[in-house]
Amino acid sequence: MSPGSSAATARPDIEKQTWAVTGGARGLGSCLVRHLSDRGARVLALSRRRGPDLPGVTYLPYDQSDETSIRNAAHLISGPVDHVVHNAAILGDIGGLATLTADHLAEVMRINVAGPLLLTRALLCRLTPNGTLTFISSRAGSFTEGHDPDGDYAYCLSKAALNRAVAKLADDLPHRVLAVHPGWLATDMGGAVAPDDPDLAAQRIVSLVIRTDGPETGSFTDTLGQPILP
Ligand SMILES: NC(=O)c1ccc[n+]([C@@H]2O[C@H](COP(=O)([O-])OP(=O)(O)OC[C@H]3O[C@@H](n4cnc5c(N)ncnc54)[C@H](OP(=O)(O)O)[C@@H]3O)[C@@H](O)[C@H]2O)c1
């Protein structure tokens, strides 16, 4: 897609688009990459390791805990980028207050919050005017809806901070910026008992991003665009 295309015509034309997806070799990220490849998009999968070879997919080395790696990955991207999906994250310690440490909290914040923000900054010069930035967040980051008995202090705090970052970016940038809760997914993070299918979540996230009547910038929603209270 050329940088000057209008939102109404360009967003659904997925086979002409370039998508950057972090954590693209495992879990929800790999489902996003596969779905986008199936639909003919050019996909830049930013990942610590390579996933399967798929049409239109390029894997770029990317460690979200490492500022140099984030900058290097962005430097490897030469053309325009239409959509960025910040998917990579860690759950971290789930032992509750008893096992929380300041170092661990800092590590989770570094990967789940600082990394996506630094990558956003590094990719802004590549993002098309109608481009979008989607941050895969979690209901766990909601003050209102995120009440569950898990001991994931660092993760909850990181997703709450990420949601605030999305609202801040939406104030500061002309692009559409979204926070999306993907559901409770049957991935390594969600566990085998999780009820939601990551492939379906990936399809819905892509549909949500390209919808011309999609959620307004700064929104925090589920994969169908239903608002989640902050
Ligand atoms: N699963 C759920 O139920 C659930 C619920 C709510 C929100 N979410 C959110 O959905 C997103 C995807 O989660 P998932 O379920 O797919 O998790 P997952 O199965 O644990 O996969 C995590 C992904 O993040 C990548 N990652 C972790 N640390 C990284 C680092 N330092 N640098 C680069 N990549 C890194 C992993 O890459 P490697 O393969 O290199 O480790 C992997 O691709 C996350 O943002 C998560 O918070 C998930």
Image (cartoon, rainbow, N blue to C red):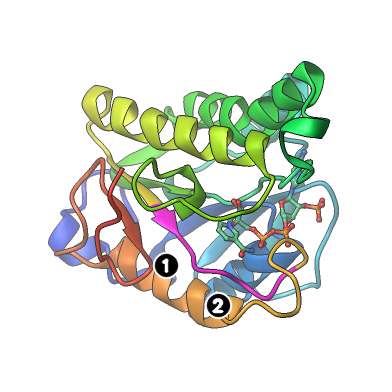
Residue type (three-letter) at the residue carrying disc 2:
His
Residue at 56% of width from left, 40% of height from top? Answer: 156
Range of magenta residues: 180-187
Q: Earlier in the sequence, mark 1 or mark 2?
A: 2
Which residue shows up at 76% across the image and 46% down it?
Answer: 94
In the image, residue 52 sits, relative to residue 177, either above or below, namely: below
Alpha-carbon distance for marks 1 and 2? 10 Å
Q: Position of residue 14 (x, y in %)?
A: 38, 70
Residue 181 on the magenta segment: yes
Please give the name of the residue rendered at 17% of the width and 65% of the height, measured from the top-left corner. Answer: 9
| Residue 109 belongs to the span the image colors magenta | no
Identify the image quadrant of the N terminus: bottom left
| Residue 213 image point, x, y percent | 14, 64
Which mark is in front, 1 or 2? 1
Residue 138 visible in the current orientation: no
In the shown orientation, is residue 173 left or right of residue 28? Answer: left
* 183 lies above or below 119: below
Residue bearing mark 1: 205
Residues packed near mark 1 inside 10 Å, few (<14), some (14 to 19) or many (20 plus): many
Q: Which mark is residue 35?
A: 2
Residue nearest the observer in this picture, 51 or 141: 141
